[in-house]
Amino acid sequence: MAGRSKTGARKRPTREQGLFGEEYERNSRLLPLLGEQKDIRYYSKFAGSVLNGPETTGMGFWSINPYVGCAFGCAYCYARYTHRYVMERASDEDRMENALTERYETMPPWLAFERNIFVKQNAPDILARTLRQGSDKHLSLLKGDAIVIGTATDPYQPAERRFRVTRRILEVLAEHPGLKVVIISKSPLITRDIDVLSRINRHSDLSVHISLITLNRELARKIEPRSPTPEARVRALARLCEAGIDAGINCMPVLPGITDNPSDLEALVKRVAEAGATYVGACALRLRSTAKQRYLPFIAQEFPHLEERYRNTYAYDSNAGKKYREGLSRFVHQLCRKYRIADWARVDDTDDEGDGALSAEHSVPSEQLLLPFPA
Ligand code: SF4
C-alpha cells in the first residue's frame, strides 16, 4: 500500500521504467486536463459504468452523476466524501499531473471537492450501451425503478455549460420510452434542455426537483456561495412548469435556526406554488461526519451564536431530534395544504430519540411548530 505524506495524502508508488521511458508512460496515464475556469480545474475521468444500482448506492433507485465534485460549494453538502475516493485512487495510480498533485497535498478535501471537477465524458456512451434494448438493466428499469440524475453532484453545475454530459445522457434516455426519470438540480441551466426533457416527458415519467432552501438571496449566498440565486431557480421552475414538465421543490436540508423560520418557509411554499410547482419536499439537516467537518466550522464562522447548539444536537447523531423533524413535517404539510400543493415532507425514522428535539409541538399553534432547536 502507498505511504502517506505529512498532509495525509498518499505518496505515489514508484514504477518500473516502461518501453517508451518512464516519463512517456506516466504522461499517458495522467487524467487529461480539460480546462480551467478561475480557480476551478476540470479533468476528464473515464467512467467504467454510469448507472449505479440500488444495491451499490443503498438507495431505492438507480442513480447517475455526470460529474465528480461540485462547484456550487454548499456548506452543508454531504457528497464530498465521494470526491475524496476519486482523488485517492488517482494518486495511488499515479494519474495526477503536478498541479493536481499539489492541490491534493495542500487543499483540504472539502475544498478540493469544489475546485477539482472530474468530468465523465464517456458517460453517455456507456449509458447507451447499458440500456441497449432487452438488456437486464433496461428490463428492470421498465418495471418502474427510477433513475435519479444528480444524487451526489449537481448535473447542471457550471461544467455542464461547456461539457454537456448531462444533456447527452438525457438524449440517450429520450431514446428509451417507459422509464421513470428524476433530475435534481439548483441550476436554471436545466431550462437549456427543455427540448430534450420534453421528448423524455412524452414517453416516460419525468420529474424535476429544483433544490431551494430559502428565498433570501443574501442568506443563500452565504450558505451556497456559488449556486444560482433563489430567484433564478424559481424562474427556472416556472419555465419547466410552463413547458408541461412536472417540477417541484426540494427544500432540503432545512437548517435548524437558520432557514426554519416559519414565515420564511411559508413565503417559500407560497412563491413556488404560484410558480407552478407540483410539490414541496422538506427535511431537516442530516450531518454525517464528512459534512460535519465542513459545516460546523462554517457555523462557527458565520453563525457563532448557533455553534454550541449545533455541536450538541449533532454530537452523537447525524439527525436533528425526532420531534423537531416531526414538527417540520407537520408544518410543511399544513403549508402545502394551504397553498394547494402536494407535500413530501420527510421524517426519517431510522434512528434516535433526539435529545435535540423540539418539545410540546402538539400543543402550539401551527406558526410556532418550528421552535428553535434546543441547546
Ligand atoms: S449543489 Fe448539491 S452536490 Fe453541489 S455542493 Fe451543493 S449540495 Fe453539494
Image: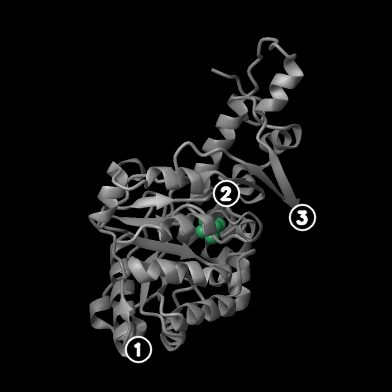
Q: Residues within 10 Å of mark 3 (few under 14, many from 20)?
A: few
Q: Are marks 1 and 3 in contact (CB under 8 Å)?
A: no
Q: Is residue 138 above or below residue 264?
A: above
Q: Amino acid at mark 2?
A: Gly
Q: Which residue position holds label 1?
A: 339
Q: Residue at x 46, y 61 (%)?
A: 309
Side of 173 where 178 appears, left or right: left
Colour mapping used in the image: one colour
SS under mark 3: loop
Position of the C terminus by quadrant: bottom left
| Picture quadrant where residue 9 is located | top right
Q: Residues within 10 Å of mark 2 (few under 14, many from 20)?
A: many
| Picture quadrant where residue 330 is located | bottom left
Spot occupied by residue 156 in the image (x, y as percentages of width and height): 56, 61
Looking at the picture, tell me which residue is in the foreground, 295 or 279. Answer: 279
Q: Residue at x 26, y 53 (%)?
A: 350
Q: Which residue position holds label 2?
A: 69
Q: Earlier in the sequence, mark 2 or mark 3?
A: 3
| Picture quadrant where residue 322 is located | bottom left
Q: Residue at x 68, y 12 (%)?
A: 18
Looking at the picture, tell me which residue is in the foreground, 99 or 128. Answer: 128
What is the spatial separation of the Cα atoms under label 1 and label 3, in whole angstroms? 42 Å
Q: Amino acid at mark 3?
A: Lys
Q: Which residue position holds label 3?
A: 38
Q: Is residue 295 above or below residue 195?
A: above
